[in-house]
Amino acid sequence: MTESKSITELQHICDVLIVGAGAAGLSLALKLAPFANVNVLSKGKLAEGSTLYAQGGVAAVFSDDDNIEDHIQDTLVAGANLCDEEAVRFTVSNAKESIQWLIDTGVDFDTEVDQLGQTQYHLTQEGGHSHRRILHSADATGKEIENTLLSAVKKHKNINLMEGYNAIDLITSRKLNLPANRILGAYVWNRKAECVETVKAHFVTLATGGASKVYQYTSNPDVSSGDGIALAWRSGCRIANMEFNQFHPTCLFHPDAKSFLLSEALRGEGALLLRPDGTRFMPDFDQRAELAPRDIVARAIDYEMKRLGVDCMYLDISHKDKEFIVKHFPTIYRRCLLLGIDMAVQPMPIVPAAHYSCGGVMIDHHGQTDIDGLYAIGEVSYTGLHGANRLASNSLLECIVYAHACAKDIINRLPFYKEHKFAIIPDWDDSQVENSDEAVVIQHNWHELRLFMWDYVGIVRTDKRLERALRRVQLLQQEIDEYYSNFKVGNNLLELRNLVQVAEIIIKSAMQRKESRGLHYNLDYPNQLDNPQPTILSPDKNS
Ligand SMILES: Cc1cc2nc3c(=O)[nH]c(=O)nc-3n(C[C@H](O)[C@H](O)[C@H](O)COP(=O)(O)OP(=O)(O)OC[C@H]3O[C@@H](n4cnc5c(N)ncnc54)[C@H](O)[C@@H]3O)c2cc1C
């Protein structure tokens, strides 16, 4: 039962509201805290998000043998001629400083002693990188980053952590028929008290992560339901390049594994991809073999699985010493062993799974969106860095670089807004809705959506499949809108409403691209256009 609350309890006020407590949101909060009162929302447990599960590491030039220009070129090549070169240069040039900030904040990356007896960061290599440049904490880099940032945030008196709050919708001056198009705050669902509250803020930053949960099989945690993209879209922001969803080639195929990821670093360290009969297949697809970019590897696996009619392929690193495997991949080793697979002596069964959203809310180099005062950083955003395909380990980097850039911009602008009073915002009105009578509708639509997205809008697409998917998504949308208007909100309904919106954006983006490039592969358009452009959808034109 919902306890009744007074108006003051239902309203929060802060300088900056950050929606999301992953690498992007927490880095921003720490940078802002000396200058501003910050509220940070996480809809689930505080640490839960993709950041926590990142294994491989963060890319930055730390070796004397490496250089920034090569990192830029590797990113551009992986992005298949669709990156925004300015964004790539901006991110890569700021990489070392951003990673140094993580180190100064307490993140403990692995080190090694070189031949001269000097301690250096141990750098791994991943697919698409021409050098060893991945800083990591064994194979649990994300956990180290998330926990370190979280403990720093918890110590800061200016940061108010709001755990278990879903942002439902943004509040803008345009929605309230006030002048200009400026952010004013957000309505948020307090999961514990089961009621909707209001957060008023001078600035709001979306740091909600990706949308890979729109697919049946995903490496992502449950919170990756594209909420920030849907919130921004409903408020009038442009969304770009959503047809480019990265499928990680190697998730463990096991009924109890729930898409546990087998890091790219395994292939970087020599793991081979095998058919069920033990033969290698990657050399038949690309001269870089197992070190080819992820899209090529994922498509090759998908192709071989469909050709042979089998449920999975295999990843084998058992030719390496057990000691090496256990030292470099302790988490993966332990997890596999628990499931009865000893990776030091046998190959691991794998399938591809939706992993990373390259597109998102369009922003500039400060993270500013189309709405004044609304920012987006991390996986929810589209910066232009990834183009048609993300280079491994560039995403955590993007979170930190853009969090810092966003903080700088907000700190510059904040004194002006602190002078202003907050607008009067009407409380959430749920007087006309009732408790849901048939939760099965949500459950059913969840499954239906994620299954047809996997089958029709997955690794390989056709025009016919996309048209089919669009018809289905529009039907679901009607049903969910009706449900949303009649019943009280809850986590599953809020996520489903956002997912179905994001699914429609993905399908429409895929339909607009009349070529195959990077992560988007359409059998009806196997070739590449000469002058490719990002796909930009605008809610004003597509509503
Ligand atoms: C298994 C796995 C391995 C990976 N490995 C690597 C790697 O080695 N290197 C690399 O660079 N990248 C890697 N990635 C990608 C990288 O981890 C993510 O892109 C990055 O962590 C995203 O960080 P974020 O801060 O944008 O979002 P997240 O870390 O996903 O955090 C999202 C936050 O938003 C909150 N949230 C979402 N919606 C709402 C809402 N409506 N209301 C309130 N809160 C909300 C969530 O609760 C959460 O706190 C990996 C991803 C996965 C899944």
Image: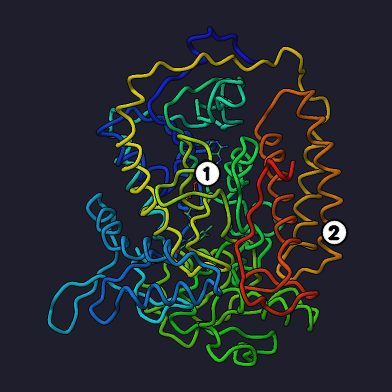
Q: Secondary structure at mark 1?
A: loop
Q: Residues within 10 Å of mark 1 (few under 14, many from 20)?
A: many
Residue 344 image position (x, y, % from top left): 48, 79
Q: How many marks?
A: 2
Q: Is residue 104 left or right of residue 374?
A: left
What residue appears at the point 39 percent right and 24 percent down from the top-left corner?
14
Q: Which residue is mark 1?
A: 208
**Could you say which is closer to the camera, residue 450 or residue 293?**
293
**Could you say which is closer to the camera, residue 455 or residue 269?**
455
Q: Residues within 10 Å of mark 2 (few under 14, many from 20)?
A: some
Quarter holding the N terminus is top right
Q: CA distance from mark 2 to mark 1?
A: 29 Å
Q: Secondary structure at mark 2?
A: helix
Q: Compare marks 2 and 1 and give the one earlier in the sequence.
A: 1
Q: Is residue 538 left or right of residue 322?
A: right
Q: Which residue is mark 2?
A: 467
Above or below 541: residue 423: above
